[in-house]
Amino acid sequence: MTQANGSLPGIGPVLRTQDLQMRYGRGAGLVRALNGVELEAAAGEAVAVMGPSGSGKSTLLNLLGGLERPSAGEVWLAGNRIDGMSEKELARLRRQSIGFVFQAFHLMDELTAQENVELPALLAGRSPRTARRRAAQLLERVGLDDRAGHLPSAMSGGERQRVAVARALVNEPLIVLADEPTGNLDSAATADVLRLLDGLRAAGQTLVIVTHDARVTAIADRLITMRDGSLVEETRLTRGTVGRLAELTGLEG
Amino acid sequence: MGRTLLVFRLAARDLRRRPAEAVLLLLALTAATATLTLGLILNGVISEPYQSTREATAGPDVIASLGRLHGAETGPDPAALKALTDAPGVVAHSGPYLYTQAALEAGGVTVRVWAQGRHTSPADVDQPKVTEGNWVRDGGAVLEAGLAQALGASAGDRITLGGRSFQVAGVAVTAAMPPYPKVCYSPCRYGAAAQNAPPPPIESLPPTSKAGPPPGAFWMGASGLIWLSEADAQSFAKQTQSLGYLVNLKLADPAGAATFVRGHFQNLVTAPSLATWQDVFDGHMWLIEAQRTALMGGTWLLGLIALGSIAVLVGGRMTDQLRRVGLLKAVGGTPGLVAAVLLAEHVAVALLATVAGLVTGWLAAPLLTEPGAALLGSAATPAVTPATAGLVAAVALGIAGLASFVPAVRAARTSTVRALADVPRPPRRAARLIAISARLPVPLLLAVRAAARRPRRTLLAVAGVAVSVTGIVAALSVHADRYAEKAPGTDPRTGLSQALLMVAIMLVVQAAVNAICIIWATTLDARRSSALARALGATPDQVSAGLAAAQALPALAGALLGLAGGIGLAEVLNEDAVVIPPPWQLAAVILGAVAVVTALTAVPARIGARRSVGEILRTEAA
């Protein structure tokens, strides 16, 4: 059983898992995607999860966000155990407390950037006017206020991912879960997105970022390494580390 | 040869890989081909009982009748008829027989009848076959079997004829006149004469009048036939002053009856009215003519829905098979090969549907064409001629080809790289609907956006339901039109109702297939957006309700359109003013259509909503 306790001094964990397990198949075809993972993320903390393909990173993120149910173990978010919640409760949790950023962006192709960002707010029951105003603010924050009326197909990968980040923030979530947010981006777009995530971290947004990209550690407080479904290493990243990686990625220290 | 083999091998493998879709295609096409087969072969099924009746009753080849003209001071001259009996080609005859008209009341129902005076001994030509009781006697009338059936009368019953009481001596069939309510002698005209010199109809009395026709004239319109003794017929003729004579002629060449009539036709109101045995047969056919019209109309409706179902299925398959198309192209398959594989699959299904439709139609035709009491024997086993089979096959292939053409061409034109990447066709953007939907509750927001994403499919859904409801409402309208008011005691449109019921059942089956096709395609298409909506906070119930509403809204629009279409179709099918079915029936059809579509959607939507969001998004992103 592995453990990564990331609670910052004086601040309780927003997110916590206990002996989290995920298995697919049975008998000879049994795959243990997660094997007793214990993880904590404190409020305002940015946690980067790295590891090779198939190490269970994305599965972990899906379980943290209630997109999949674990085979065993517990997931706690803001003091509530979520692994046993009904789909309806999970949906409410997702729209109130969790923002997702996906590698494949997962924007609605027929909606403009503005409409994509508005969507979670509308699903949360906000009025169209409130949703529109909040989306406009966030698009300005991610530097896309001039692209608000464009469809995803008319935007670059970096722009799409910034729209996805804005969408993740529209309901002011407790935590943002990002799955390979730079996985489909070139270097310049990666730098843009990392700068944006760094800004969120600086503003106190709790982040869990699953990635292959070492440059993401530039904006993380803690790096957790996974292999074969287990957490094998935890590194608390220092200012110096951040500064050095920031240099590598072109981010300001 | 090798290429053809490859095409068929690939097509066969694909059909085996997706048997459920193949079965849906087969069902959709079979409903159309079976109805078409029924419509085409219905013509032949009544001719055999009619021929049997003609043989058993020494049926005449020509019936000549001459009625007293309205306003004429003297009666008709039977000599004009006697001259016909000596005409070349006539080998036997019976008559002249006197006829008149009277109002017949039985069991509280009053109908008009032509009363024919007959000897008590059998005639050489036209020997009505007594199927119940005995032949005529003084005070004893024999009812034509169709009339007896309509009135529910049988031998021994008492009837009132022109205010006088009679006993029903028996019930008989004849091949010399169509059954109730299509009986008519001079001044009725038949064949070409009907166009040349139509007599003015005399409708001065209501159909329920018990008094009889106007003095010295005849009622026209729905009437039955009874046989009386000569003395009784004479007595009535004196009472009503409506008098006519008829002779039944047997020709040396029965097939030349029309030629004989043309040769002796005189465009004079004083000339006899000549009806051939073919005219009488047409009178029997009239009873199923409306059925044929309904079935042919139904075929068109079913063909339209089948076209929609197949287009949606093929489009859905294309979305699902894009990568396969890319692989085919990547290994050297030409765009032509890709199109040929797709077309070959549907040609194979269309040929199977042709066979299934021909067999179904052939088996169902006798059920729909019960010859009734007016003819002897049962409905003949209908014949499926090569022409019928060819036409049915052509229609099935045409529908399949037409529906597959656009997707086949689209698949052929899709770039190999794009196909290999399995990039789905981008959805349509309907800015206004998206803006409006933002103000709606979440399920309706999701529904409107899902419907707007694929407008062509949504239109097909609207059209499918509209066509089905059109057929059903038309059937209800015709059913509501109670013909009994015009021909008391019988409803010749029962046959039409039966045909429309069959079409309606086929339409419901077809509509269900269509709805399943559309729902299947929509559910596949909406997998990613539904999962994404759930990831962003929509509950499974909201997503399911959204998908169901995305089908229910077009179904409602289609049902309302179908309501108007059905009444319009009934107007076309009916010679008389259409009768609107009761509001509760119309409401039941509309709500039923919406409920069925919603229920059909709810199942796949619920199943989809149970799948893990993470799994769907991972699959869709892969």
Image (tube, coloured by chain):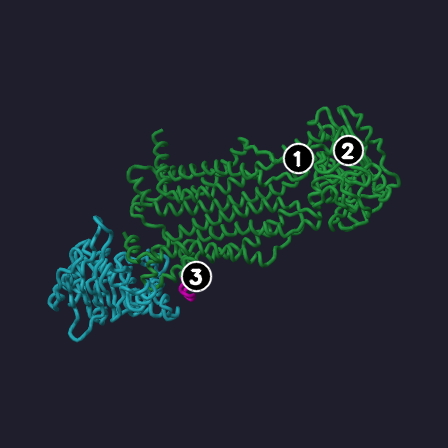
Chain colours: A cyan, B green
Chain letter of the residue carrying label 3 = B
Mark sitting on residue B376: 1
- Label whose residue precedes the other's in the sequence (2 or 3): 2
Distance in Å between CA atoms under marks 2 and 1: 24 Å
Identify the residue at the far bottom of this view. Answer: A10
Q: Which residue is mark 3?
A: B432
Q: Earlier in the sequence, mark 2 or mark 1?
A: 2
Give the number of the mark in front: 2 or 3. 2
Q: Report the chain holding disc 1.
A: B
Is residue A13 among what the camera can see? yes
The magenta stretch spans residue B439: yes
- Give the spatial CA distance, label 2 vs label 3: 73 Å
Q: Amino acid at mark 1?
A: Leu
Q: Residue furthest right?
A: B73
Residue B92, quarter of the rendered image = top right
Secondary structure mostly seen in the magenta stretch? helix
Q: Which residue is mark 2?
A: B64
Callout 2 and callout 1 share a chain: yes
Q: Earlier in the sequence, mark 3 or mark 1?
A: 1
3 vs 1, front mark: 1
Q: Is residue B55 above or below residue B301?
A: above
SS at circle 2? strand
